[in-house]
Image: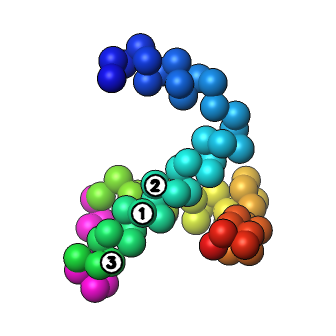
């Protein structure tokens, strides 16, 4: 699939659809890592670890509100 096609597809996603897609991908990747390793450890310099630190800092500054599992996934979680 060409980059132009991928960009066009992403551009047509609603914010809710994009958020749901991101949650699904992260869940799948963490589940895969969990199955392979049993426990997931992130290196301090990994992009995901750095993102999680930034999310925590944003939450502590009151810039974002972290949803509960029920709010985020509802009956699908």
Between the residue at mark 2 and the residue at mark 1, the CA separation in whole angstroms equals: 5 Å
Write down the residue under mark 2. 25
Write down the residue under mark 1. 28
Q: Which residues are magenta?
A: 37-45
Residue 3 position (above or below residue 23): above
The crowd level at tag 3 (other Cα within 10 Å; few <14, some 14-19, many 20+) is: few
Task: Tell whether label 3 touches label 2 (CB within 8 Å).
Answer: no
Task: Tell me the quarter of the picture where residue 29 sits.
Answer: bottom left
Question: In the image shown, does 28 or 66 lie closer to the viewer?
Answer: 28
Task: Tell whether label 1 touches label 2 (CB within 8 Å).
Answer: yes
Q: Secondary structure at mark 2?
A: helix
Q: Is residue 28 rendered to the left or right of residue 74?
A: left
Residue visible at 28% across and 59% down? Answer: 45
Question: In the image shown, does 55 or 23 lie closer to the viewer?
Answer: 23
Q: Residue furthest left?
A: 36
Can residue 36 be seen?
Answer: yes
Write down the residue under mark 3. 34
The crowd level at tag 2 (other Cα within 10 Å; few <14, some 14-19, many 20+) is: few
Mark 2 and mark 3 lie on one chain; the one further toward the N terminus is 2
Residue 46 position (above or below residue 11): below
Residue visible at 29% across and 78% down? Answer: 35
Residue visible at 33% across and 23% down? Answer: 1
Q: Secondary structure at mark 1?
A: helix
Between the residue at mark 1 and the residue at mark 3, the CA separation in whole angstroms equals: 10 Å
Between the residue at mark 2 and the residue at mark 3, the CA separation in whole angstroms equals: 14 Å
Q: Is residue 54 rendered to the left or right of residue 41?
A: right
Query: How many tags in the picture?
Result: 3
């Amino acid at each position: 699939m060409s980059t132009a096609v991928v960009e066009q597809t992403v551009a047509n996603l609603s914010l809710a659809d994009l958020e749901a897609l991101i949650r699904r991908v992260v869940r799948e990747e963490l589940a895969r890592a969990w199955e392979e390793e049993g426990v997931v450890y992130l290196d301090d310099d990994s992009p995901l670890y750095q993102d999680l630190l930034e999310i925590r800092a944003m939450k502590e500054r009151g810039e974002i509100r972290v949803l509960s599992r029920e709010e985020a996934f509802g009956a699908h979680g």
